[in-house]
Image: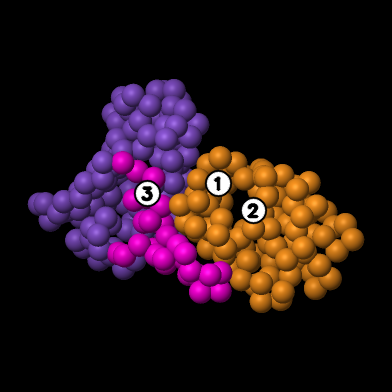
Amino acid sequence: MELAQERDAGTNVIRPAGRVDGSNSADFHESLMAALSGDDNRVILDMGGIDYISSAGLRVLLLLAQHLSGNSTPFAVCSLAASVDEVFRISGFNQIITVFGTLDEAKAQLA
Amino acid sequence: MRRSLIITPVPGAAAAEALPRIVAFVEEMAELDDWAPDLVLRSNLILEELILNTLTHGRTSGLCDIEITLESGENAVTITLVDDGAAFDPLNDEPSPDTNLPLQERSIGGLGLHLVRTMAEDLQYKHADGKNHLTLVARSGV
């Protein structure tokens, strides 16, 4: 899965696009892990380009969040589409992963 | 409009290989009956979670096919799934996960069915004639 990415002074912004379902979640996981670096001071996943995520995709986000939490690397997601926000709320992911409305808010507030 | 699709498990194939056909089926119905975008997303999510659950959780023994029927309604779609696998009530046979656990204690088990139970309406399950029958409604704009 193709991910756009920008790094700025230790902030790693990862921007996936498309749908994340059971058919590409393993690929999504591999791409996300490859996008991380030991130099990251914090990681922001900009989900603005994702309009569909199933439990298979949530599993990947959970693994990523647990991995980064284990490294004490601050992690947040931002710009959730309404459909993705609904899935986050039902699954309680908004209680375990920091969610910001926009990328600018995430950059300003994630510490 | 009312249409059906039959999914047949392919021995040795990953369950997720069934997904593109399901997505195409939903998209086709959505276009013909002019579904709202959120209805398309919800229908796809409900079908993905239920069908992958059936295909991946060892309930494929004796499973020959899963029949999916979609019927468009007023801002809603009625989804009916009938399969001839082992009896399984997706509404009650698997407990809902604790969605309040802290990050390191969370696991993903049961989350798919939890999404379905929360997102869908009018869920009804029965086991009859040796088959699982599940009916539920996906609604737009709730």
Assess whether residue A37 is covered by the magenta stretch: no
Mark 1 vs mark 2: same chain?
yes
Which label is found at residue A99? 2
How far apart marks 3 and 2 lie (CA) works out to 21 Å
Q: Give percent across and percent down for residue B39.
A: 43, 34
Could you tell me the amino acid type at mark 3?
Answer: Thr
Residue B65 relative to residue A36: left or right: left
**Which chain identifier belongs to the purple chain?**
B
Q: Look at mark 1 in the image and give the residue it sits on.
A: A85
Q: Which residues are magenta?
A: B94-121
How far apart marks 1 and 3 lie (CA) works out to 14 Å
* Residue nearest the viewer, comparing B10 with B97: B97
Residue A1 relative to residue A104: left or right: left
Q: Look at mark 3 in the image and give the residue it sits on.
A: B118
Q: Kindly tell me whether residue B55 is visible in this rendering.
A: no
Residue occupying the point 50% across, 45% down: A86
* Residue nearest the viewer, comparing B33 with B76: B76
Could you tell me the amino acid type at mark 1?
Answer: Asp
Among the 4 quarters of the image, the one containing residue A13:
bottom right
- Judge whether A86 appears above or below B9 on screen: above
